[in-house]
Image (spheres, grey):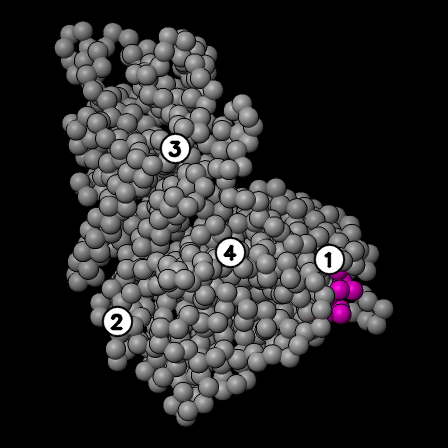
Amino acid sequence: MQHRPTSVFRRERPQHDEARYLRRELSWLAFNRRVLEEAEDDRVPLLERAKFLAIVSSNLDEFVMVRVAELVEQVRGHGPEAEQARAVLLEVRSGIARLVADQYRCWRESVQPKLAQAGFRIVPPAEWNEADRESMRVFWRDQLEPIVTPLAVDPTRPFPVIPNRAIAVAVQLESGSGETNTAIVTVPKERRLIGLVSQAGACALLEDVIMHHLDALFPGHHIRARCLFRITRDGSIEIDEEQAADLLTELEQELFDRERGAPVRLEVVAGGDRGLRSWLAHRLSLDEQAIVTVDGPLDLTVLHTVGDIIDRLPGGPRADLRDPPMPVQLNPARWDDPFAVIRQRDLLLHHPYESFQRIVELVERAAEDPAVLAIKQTLYRVSGDSPIVKALARAARSGKQVTVLIELKARFDEAANIRWARALEDAGAHVIYGLVGYKVHAKLLMIVRRDDDGLRRYCHIGTGNYNDRTAKLYTDLSYLTANEAIGRDVAALFNMLTGYSRPPEFERLWVSPLTMRSNMTAAIRREAEHARAGRPSRIIAKFNALVDEAICDELYAASQAGVQIDLIVRGMCILRPGIKGLSENIRVFSIVGRLLEHSRIFYFANAGNPQWLIASADWMTRNLDRRIEVGVIIDDPALTDRLQRILEICLSDNRAVRELQADGTYVRRRPQLRERERSAFAELCAEAAAQAIVRPVAPRDRRFRPRRKGDVAR
């Protein structure tokens, strides 16, 4: 692994060919637009619609902290790149403004009125009755006033550092002598919905309670104007890893500094004083384009808690306002000895249709089993109360050799990973904090066990994180095997990551940044050669994002050679499909619905000898060149048949799927006349349930049929 960057957080310079590639930033905004469409869809249960509104806000926060912040930094440069970044930034900010306007229109005109009918209301101070005002006065006196601090802004008291994503109010004051002053009051990061006594389910926003009692903070002054606002800051971390003496300590300092990064966006509530709005923008060194006006509550992630409030109303939980409970299968049905099951056959689990609990139980069993000698695992994002990390700690305390490569630089999970790293070290595990210049994003688990016939390696290779909570919401794949070749590959890769061994010649793994890009490129070019020779050729891939121009170019070339290509890309996609002479044989779909589509599957027809791969990597430059990623070739016919069924189901969906057009817009597929609605979610639930039924598997044609123009793939 040569030519390592000094930091995995290094900025990318914009390079773009408008005719061949869509803008990645605009493609991301189009993805969040598809999330908003779920909130706008009357077929979606009400509390799920509120949840999607909250997700739009949290998605936008991360986009602003990462990508918009990168563009702002690039604009500060000079030359054509800075000018290009300036044009992109202007277009992105315009797109954000339109998205936010539509988000709040959906809140005001649809979701909010329906929530009120269901018993939940956010009540502004003007509508509080006498009992509400008295209860809020007591709440202010006892709970808020002791912790809220007014901060004057004048020549001796500079503009305060307001934490990232905190809500605050700017206040213009007039003293008895007529002198005008300005102050800031930051809203505590506590629960934002405060129950009112007048009606069950009626709530006040915490910031409204503070706004209502501002006079108490400024005795002797008259409040002339106020403006409620929220700041989003640059969320990047800049570390020269090769010069860092202690990565963990320096990362902790960077996390502290990130909360005080450069302001990137200013959100203000509609109706706020325009003079204060301009004053805030000047103090924060933001131009008018960086200001977003919202006609409703700031930060709609507050809607994540609405369901709990409604559930406490008379009548109890409202199942009619939520998606029906998801049928989750415990496959394999027998798991009292997981090692015996894995020795018998390779397993492929599709989460969350099949419970991730089986993977948790495997690690827990390994921690307790006296025959297990060693456990090696990569961790990128784990839950706050991770049973897997706890099991690894127990294994280490019991004397097993436990090696954990925990990626401290997992964006926005750095603090949690630091805590887990220290807990594992305290338990006696050998903890590695990633690699200099690379993020370790691979999902790998290897258990070394002394079986009756000798030592054996049991491996898990996944497409998603070892996170028992997100595994209930993200679709992912788990591959479990005791295959010797795969065991050798995984062991060699761990040795390379933890020590100084040279990269091996992998038998069944594709590994970034060593072989993943070259193998993907070779596989795409091989399909093009088959097509030119008249042999069966096809590419189908399901993953999260396509933003690597070199991969796009290979796909364009394959399309021109006659290869039929179907891509199921949940999020960003810069490839322009359906352009005559360039990409007329490429279709791009996106599924946005109840679950976050996170599984990564790659299929290459290969002239009738199909090649199948699941991987941790997307077709992004960072995944192929700047991260440790792993893909594994799967050749078990029963498992590849299942991968084929999963792709067929996704491609036949006509409820949640949208098709990308050459201009970057997405068109939602609807059932045609007399065509039944086909939901990939419903069909994949049924497919997982069928896995629990043991029956002889009849031989089948494992090739995909040729796709005719306009066909829905089967």
**Occupied quadrant, residue 210:** top left
Mark 1 and mark 4 residues within 8 Å of each other at the beta carbon: no
Nearer-N-terminus badge (2/4): 2
The answer to whether residue 361 is magenta is: no
Residue hosting label 1: 333
Residue 703, image x and y in percent? 53, 80
Instruction: Check disc 4: other Cα within 10 Å, few if <14, some if 14-19, many if 20+.
Output: many
Marks 2/4: CA–CA distance: 33 Å
The amino acid sitting under disc 4 is Phe
Residue shown at 19%/43% (left/top)?
A: 289
**Occupied quadrant, residue 212:** top left
Marks 3/2: CA–CA distance: 44 Å
The answer to whether residue 343 is magenta is: yes
Q: Secondary structure at mark 2?
A: loop
The stretch of residues the image draws in magenta is 338-345
Between 30 and 615, which is closer to the camera in this rendering? 30
Residue hosting label 2: 20
The amino acid sitting under disc 2 is Arg
Residue 17 visible (yes or no): yes
Disc assigned to residue 681: 4
Disc assigned to residue 114: 3
Q: Residue furthest front?
A: 674
**Occupied quadrant, residue 522:** bottom left
Residue shown at 57%/42% (left/top)?
A: 384
